[in-house]
Image: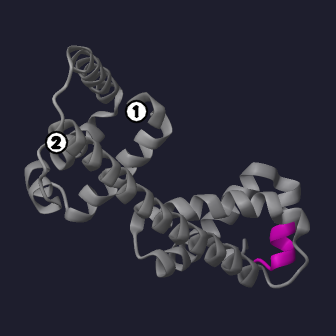
Amino acid sequence: MERRESEITEQEWINKIYTGGAAAYKDFVKAYYEHVYRTAYAVLHHHQDAEDVTQEVFVQIYRALPEYRNQGLKTWITRITVNRAIDMRRKLARQKVTVAQDEQWIEDHAQQADSTILSTEQAIMLQERKVFIQEELDRMPEHYKDVIHSFYIDEKSYEEIASELQLEKKSVESRLYRARLWLKRHWRREDFE
């Protein structure tokens, strides 16, 4: 009779992973996935962020397994998860500050543009920049374009966007957050200065 994963001792898990490789690690992930996800969610209170942390935790565990010293497998996993979730929460807080600063920078530059009469050369450069920005927006994944355009161009609230796109408000927040991350990864600030 085969035992369930929950009945396998921690040393048996370690041995199974070392001898069974990726297939055994997949069983390990299945056995502990719910625990890791719930721990991450308890810190972050956000489904997608908890999912992201869960994925990262299992990668970190796999890499750190050779250093594991029989200190209580579930306790060790929980400690890694909590630390990773706290790191994510700090990172998200820093990104919110950065996004707010970026939004302020855009607003300041827009006000400067409105308050000065542009020369012909400046007008041409501004038009070229608009074309460049539009081309970059066209490269963006479709489900991000909608929320970026609605929020920044049309200046709609999360509730209005959620209603238009038939999404939950949390989904709009998540898409907007991920769209900003996409922009940060694919755009350089100097392209817009």
* 9 drawn magenta: yes
| Left or right of residue 40: residue 177 | left
Quadrant where the N terminus is found in the figure = bottom right
Q: Amino acid at mark 2?
A: Ile
Q: What x and y, as percent, mark residue 168?
A: 20, 62
Q: Magenta region: which residues? A: 8-14
Q: Residue at x 62, y 59 (%)?
A: 56
In the image, residue 57 lies in the stretch drawn in magenta: no
Residue found 24% across the figure and 15% down from its top: 124
Left of 172 or right of it: where is 59? right
Q: Which mark is residue 193?
A: 1
Can you say whether 152 is above or below 157 in the image?
above
* Cα separation between marks 2 and 1: 19 Å
Q: Which residue corresponds to the image point at 46% horizontal and 42% vertical from the top-left?
A: 184
Nearer to us: label 2 or label 1: 1
Secondary element under disc 1, as helix, strand or loop, is: loop
Relative depth, front residue between 147 and 151: 151
Provide residue 165's location: percent of width, then percent of height.
13, 49
- Quadrant assignment, res 134: top left
